[in-house]
Amino acid sequence: MAASIWAWLPAALLVVSFGSFAWGMQRFFARPAGTNPGMTAIKLCSTVFLAIHFTALVWPREVNPQAAGAGSGLYVGALLLFWWAIFTNRSKPLSAAFSPDLPHHLVEQGPYRVIRHPFYSSYLVAWLAGVIASGQPWLVVTAVVMTALYTKAALSEEAKFSRSALAQPYELYRARTGLFLPSPLKLLRGTHFLAQPSRDAAEARPVREGLSSPPAESVPDGSQAQAADAVLPRAAVDC
């Protein structure tokens, strides 16, 4: 009975996790320019790899309770991080991965205090969970491919910040946060930044201009001209 539970619990959590991610893509993230090749690549790879992970989890095999338990824990962690990021951005949903719109607000609350792309982080944790829970090392290939796609999306979003009016405050923000994981060195070096935004960033907030993934991610509301006259709200980017 216990073996049966450990065989199906990770598979059930996989369905809940990726069901949440799919909801986010359809209901939460905006698509100011419609679907693009980057989104299509992520969707296609995710669909194929999800089927492979699910099959690996439910395929009759000798179940390792420790591995299944560790994988289940990672799925739960991915879900918690995902919904924490959703809650943090609930008032201003972000744009989907690879969207071309420039970011016009910066999120520094919730998980964004220590990582710049919590949505991507949650996805990667879920892919890693499948590798561990299934006990199939070859599934690492799927995690590597998805890591490459999410990294490309995250870096493209960060490049958009460098071209926006938020370039300076974003550089300060990037200096104290990690890409997908918290940076212990940055946390030790800039603990005071976590308590409150830097003076330079605060002074730069009134300057606003018109992202993605959750990542840093941008929000598509308002034109760049309107954004330049508005007061910058507290927010971030990532999908």
Image (tube, grey):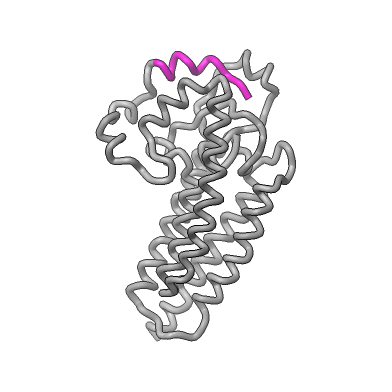
> Relative to 39, does residue 189 appear above or below in the rendering?
above
Task: Name the image quarter holding the N terminus.
Answer: bottom left
Q: Position of residue 235 (x, y in %)?
A: 51, 30
Residue 119 x/y as whole percent: 51, 47
How far across and how far down the image is residue 199, in percent?
38, 16
Residue 86 on image: x %, y %: 53, 44
Above or below residue 133? Residue 203 is: above
Residue in the picture at 26% in, 30% down: 189
Residue 208 in sight = yes
Residue 239 seen: no
The correct choice, above or below, for 134 with respect to 73 in the image is below
Give the image quarter of residue 194: top left
State left or right for residue 62 relative to residue 187: right
Relative to 28, say whether 206 is above or below: above
- Please tell me how many numbered marks the rendered image carries: 0
Identity of the residue drawn at 45% across and 85% down: 61
At 72% from the left and 46% from the top, the residue drawn is 35
Q: Answer with left or right where residue 43 lies relative to residue 161.
A: right
Q: Residue at x 53, y 15 (%)?
A: 206
Viewer-nearest residue: 27 or 62: 62
- Residue extending furthest toward the left: 188
Instruction: Choose top left, top right, bottom left or bottom right for residue 220.
Output: top right
> What span is colored magenta in the figure?
200-210
Q: Determine if the magenta segment contains residue 174.
A: no
